[in-house]
Structure formats: structure tokens, C-alpha cells
Amino acid sequence: MRICRHICTSFGATKYEITRILLASLGADRENRTPASSLARTHSTTKPYPLRGNYSTRCIYVSSAPTRIRTQNSTSEASRDIHFTIGAYMHSTALCYDLRMEYRIPKEIKTVSEGLRKAGFGSYLVGGCVRDLLVEKEPKDWDITTNASPEQIQAVFPDSFYENDYGTVGVKTGSTDKRIEIVEVTPYRTESYYSDKRRPDKVTFGASLLEDLARRDFTINAIAFDDAKGHVIDHHEGLKDIKDKIVRAVGNPRERFDEDALRMLRAIRFVAELNFGIDGDTANAISENSKHLGHVSCERIRDEFVQILESSQPMNALSLAQRLGILEFIAPELVRGVGAKQNKTHSYDVFEHLLRTLQHAADKNFNLDIRLAALFHDISKPEASRWSDEKNDPTFHGHEVIGSRVTKGILENLRFPRETIDKVVKLVRWHMFFSDPEQITLSAVRRMINNVGGENIWDLLNLRMCDRIGTGRPKEQPFRFRKYKAMVEQALRDPISVSMLKTNGNHIIEKFHEKPGPRVGYVLNALLEEVLDNVSLNNEEYLDKRIKELLEMSEDSLQKLGESGKQRRKVEENEEIRHIMEKHHVL
């Protein structure tokens, strides 16, 4: 078994190169590795992680003695022996002193690790946080595994809680950062008997670190890191899979998915989040065992689905989910779009159009509501499709109405929050709004804003942009669409009018005993002109004082001031509209 360790002082590498060096050193093909299938390769959309420099010859190989390591450097004939102690797991570890990884570990996490070690226990970072550090992502949460029992962990950290059957103790760090406010510390454990295809019936503490790693889902998550010694423990060659950008199950994938069916959906999620491909044997096992997802709760499926949608590559992931037979456990209605032909304005079938629309929403970093609406906006085109002899093309009249109902059912089944359901349903229902500014009026735009809600109108317009790209059109915002956006902004803004004043006609009539008539309007327009020049004058004290002065003026003088103010208002209003048109490049 190859054991690799880079001694940075020997080779002059910087601390920022060390993770890359370790990955490069594990680049040789492993024996008995299941080759990736064409399915896996199809969905591996990126090259392996690039490695800076040529470190392929800077590897350290095991000699006959377990604590004697011989380094070879092909640039010279020289070799030398290095002695160091690596503990009981030397035969199955890959070691690296990764300074960059160490520097990125928050002090609160180090404090917990050090606390366990000072109490005489082992402590390793494990799982997703190690994976994220290796791929240079900020970990969302931090997990530590130890040979201490839950009771011993709580004895070391009195400010902690233990409320589960899996031995996980939540240690409070006192941090205001939600990601490290609670650190989960779990004893080494083994699991067995998964009668519900989700949770183990039996959990046994007191296992070894290697046994604990063996129970995990994917090799990229079965890596442990000793932050004190800088040792990476990688019994399942997860580092190689990270380098190759492959999601591969630990051990026998069929056994892993039989234990916990949700792992199949997690595999798709990692493909989306990391932009990885999937190992061929792992993909085949998902396809064969997809039916087991029927044992998983809707809430669990929703949580994985949301993370897929919020990733950078949801299109590839959901396409893979469809091919492996697990998309039907998320939203079976989507599967009906596969191969469903559209009219001549579209370049893709319904399913691919929905995925491309979603992908553009992800590329633009739009919110979850827009991404959900992008995925479901045309979901009912297959059932709404009717052939038109007149157009010699299919039509889909009313698909947005049917689709809004179908979308509502999908989101309710997945237990989405009511607020999310209501908004996404509105976006799907009104996504077919007519947006030709040459044929609609500002009143029509206001009616659309009223239909979808002023708080949702910009998300609706963003959905339309994604829809255009998903159709295969080269521009997301042509001139007519930009002009429609300008009309929306006009409709939403408060017009320049006397209503902006902190007074009104009723106030003038009641306080100054003025009779209703043109004079009240003249006063308001004269006040508006002054406030447009100096907004600080828009206060009740000044306005009342000025109203009294204006009412004492002659009828002709007051009328001239009022007409001047009215003209000034029109000029300012036109200038505001001109700025809006310039902003959207439609002048």
C-alpha cells in the first residue's frame, strides 16, 4: 500500500501547494478499480483538479520496515531515509502535512479538538468538512470523531447536549457564526441492520477509526484529518477520487444504498455541488436500487432537492437523476417532459428546456423561488399539447394554468413552506405574460403587477429571461423586453405629484378655512415647485407657514405660481422617465 508524505522543507514547496502535491502523488491508477461507465463520463463535465508544478516524482514509498520511509527524487540519484511515527494505522493511510488546510480551520474547532486530546482521547476532523477543505470550499459545518464515549465527551465539554441514538454530542463553542456555533462530536461507531432503508437498527460504539470511516457513504467523505499532526487518513482512496472528480461509494455501493436509500440522492447532490462525475459501478447500483427511495420521507427528499437546485450545476444533476430512475421520486411529472416535442420556436424537448431554464437561473445566481419556477414553469405542456393544422405546429394553450396547479401539488407533496409554494405558483401561473411594449399600455403593465404582486414582479421578469435562454434564443433581454422592464419600473415608481407633499387639500381647507376650488390646487403646485428645489422644506411647519403666505396673495399672482409649479412637475416627471429608459437601454 502506498503511503505518501510531502516534507515541504525538503522540496521547497510553499504551504499553499501542499494539498495539490498530495493529490498529485496519488495519481497512479488503483488496482481492481471499477472503470467509470459511459454514463459517468457523460456527466463528468470538468477536467481533474489542476496541479501546480511537477510533483509526480516526489512521492514516498513504504519500505520493508513500517516506520522507515524512503524518498526518491528522479531529478537526482540521491535517496535518503526518513524516520517518523504514524501510529497503528500506517498500513492504510495517506499522510500529508497540509499547512493550508490547517490555517483554514477555525480556532473554535481547534479548541474542541485540543480539548479531547488533552483529556486523553483521539480527535479527527471527518466527513464533509475535510472534503470541502481539500476542494477549497468553505465548509458548511464541522464534524469531529473520537474514541471517547458520549458520556466522556460531555464530561470534557459540560456546555453540550446529547439527544440522539447515534452518539453525536453537540458542543457549544460560543461563536456567533452559525456554521461553528455547534460542533458535532461523534464516537467511532459501526452500524448494522437498516430495516427501514434509512436508519440503522443497531449502533455500536467503541469501534476503530478505520471501522468508522468504512461505514460512510462516499470515498470523498470517508477522509479523516488529524489537525494536530497534519495527518490525512484515507483508507478508501477518497483523495484520488477528489483529484479525478468522481463520486464513488465506499466499498460495495449496493450495500451502501441498501443501508440508506437517501445516499442515492446525496450522490446526485454531490455531482451538482462539486461538479463531479459519478463512478460507473456506483451509478449502476443507484439505477438498480432507486425503488428504495420510496422508503425515504418527503422532507428528506426535499432537503436534498433544494441543495441540488441551489448548486452551480443543477442541470447535469437532474439529467443524471432522470437517467438513473430517481427523478420520479422527486417530481414524477417532470419525467413526462422527456421527448415531449415543442413548437418551432423551441430548440429542445420540454424536459431539456426546463433543465436549461433552471441552469440559466443558477448561472445568474437567482434565488430558490426563481429556480423552482424555472424547473416547473412548462411542466404541463405535455398534457396541454394540441396539434394545430393552421399553424402546422403543436399549441399549448392554458399550460401555465394547469402547470400552476401541478406545481402546487408537487411542492405541497415535498412539504415546502406555504410562502414558497404561493410565490412559485404565482410565477408559474403568470409566466406567459404578454410583453410587447408596442401593443400594451402602462395600465396593462399595472394589472400584471397586481396579478403577481409588486414584490414578485422582478422575479417574474428574471424567470422570463431564463425561459428565453432555455428556449435556445441567443439573447436573454432583447430590446422589446428591456422596454417592458422600463414600463414596469415606471408603473412601480411613485409619480412626481402633489401627493409627495406632507400636506394636502383637506388640510388647507380645514386649517385655513379656504373654500374648495382652484386656489387650493394653485397653492399645492406652488409648494411642490419649492420642495423639488429643496426637499428639506417638505415639513409641516414650513408648509403651513408658506400656505398662509400664499393664500394672502392675489388670485392672478397665485395662479401664476401654481401654473409654474405644474409645468415644473411635468418637466421633472419626463426627466425621471428618460432616466429609466436610459437605464434599460431603450431610448
Image (tube, rainbow, N blue to C red):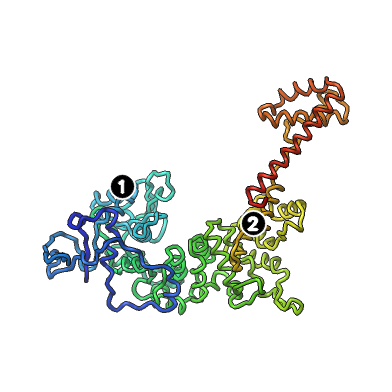
- Decide which of 141, 240 is in the foreground and name it: 240
**Place of residue 31 in the rendered image (x, y in percent of width and height, measured from the top left):** 27, 77
Label 1 crowd bin: few (<14), some (14–19), many (20+), radius 10 Å: few
Figure check: 388 above or below 68: below
391 on left or right of 476: right
Above/below status of 144 relative to 272: above
Q: Nearer the viewer, residue 524 or 326?
A: 524
Observer able to see residue 47: yes
State the residue position of label 2. 461
Question: Image point 87% across, 31% down: which residue?
Answer: 518
Kind of residue at badge 1: Thr
Quick check: 376 left or right of 572?
Answer: left
Estimate the spatial distance between the alpha carbons at disc 1 and disc 2, rounded to whole Å. Answer: 48 Å
Q: Nearer the viewer, residue 422 or 586?
A: 586
Under tag 2, what secondary structure? helix
Q: Position of residue 284 (x, y in %)?
A: 43, 78
Which x, y percent locates residue 540? 72, 26
Considering only order in the chain, which callout, 2 or 1, is on the residue closer to the N terminus? 1
Question: SS of the residue at dot 1?
Answer: helix
**Residue type, mark 2 in image:** Leu
- The residue sitting at 50% across, 71% down in the picture is 295
Q: Position of residue 77 (x, y in %)?
A: 12, 66
Quarter of the figure that contains the N terminus: bottom left
According to the picture, the residue beneath numbered tag 1 turns out to be 111
Q: Quadrant of residue 412?
A: bottom right
